[in-house]
Image (tube, rainbow, N blue to C red):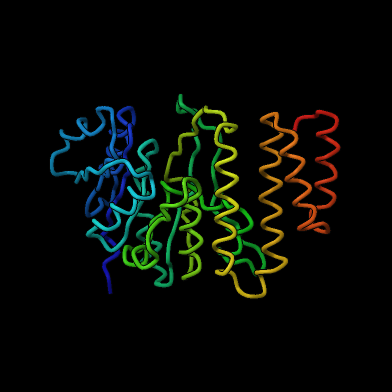
Amino acid sequence: MRDPKRVSVVIPLYNGAWCIERAVNSVLAQHQPPLEIIVVNDGSQDNGPALLKHYGDQIRVIHKANQGLSAARNTGIRAALGDYVAFLDADDYWLEDKLAAQVALFQANPNLTFCGCAAKVVDQDDRELQVWPCPNLTGEQTILSAIFAQLGLVPGSGSGVMAPTQLLLQLGGFDRELKALEDVDMWLRLASQGEFACVELPQVVILRHTDSMSGSLDLMRQHAIKVLQKNRHLLPTKLRGRYWQHCYAGMLIDYAKWAYRAKRSAQARRDLLHALRLAPLRYGKLIASLFVAMSAHKPI
């Protein structure tokens, strides 16, 4: 049986001189230290890589040309010597019990294919905005069907998940064609292979940037559609029809709200109409109320 204490931590780095030391230090402060810390420098143009030199052999730095977040994570996965990989984005950081708590989950359940942990979400002044909780599955929901219904379900996401190295490799790593939601795409594929568990107490701190979402809204929407479409086949056959349509409609409603808040009312209405065609019985009343609110220029 593999020793679940053998964890490789993978930290992608791109122009993160302002935050990389905090991230690395949070890993070094773990009560259960990892086997190794791999920082993948994805073609940074600032002095972030230079700041890592004083860590010496406490970390391993891999330098590569800039190819994006998925490629950087995949480089780390391929280089990992541990049986498990824990991911951490350079602008986030961990609390001291994070690795120990997740290792305990894998020790307790051999059927786990990935695990997460609740997360604190903070602003750029480190003020807590909210807690991103563990999923609360109901009825016959599986983690796979639940992620389809709520793409942001896995807390901490790219800074909170740990998964077996070999399974990540077998699944082909993160999809380099995706420029957004590449983490959700991977969680869906991991969820299709087994079970998920989550540490209820927050163990990761996620930085929410103040940048407006309007600039990335189209990209996020486009890739949300891609992720739902490309992974539809992972659902049990009975869920690939109406259930998947409900998930797709719910996603469109979410993006309609964000588009409206970004003063893109025409796009918001198009997405609401599309959602109505997909799931009239499930979302008809909600969509009608949103149309009324938008027509009255009320906040949503």
Instruction: Please determine whether, in this image, residue 56 is positioned above or below residue 6.
Output: above
Viewer-proximal residue, 297 or 86? 297
Work out whether residue 32 or residue 223 is closer to the camera in this orientation and state it: 223
Residue at the image point whose x is 75% and y is 52% from the top: 275
Corner quadrant of residue 84: bottom left
Residue 57, picture quadrant: top left
Q: Nearer the viewer, residue 165 or 261?
A: 261
Give 191 or 218, whichever is nearer the viewer: 218
Farthest-out residue, top: 125
Q: Quadrant of the N terminus?
A: bottom left
Percent across and percent down for residue 230 are 55, 61
Residue 109 percent across, percent down from the top left: 42, 70
Residue shown at 66% from the left, 30% from the top: 262
> Along the horizontal axis of the image, is 145 left or right of 23?
right
Q: Which residue is at a point 29% across and 34% down the rendered structure image?
A: 44
User: In this image, 287 relative to 103: left or right?
Assistant: right
Total marks drawn?
Answer: 0
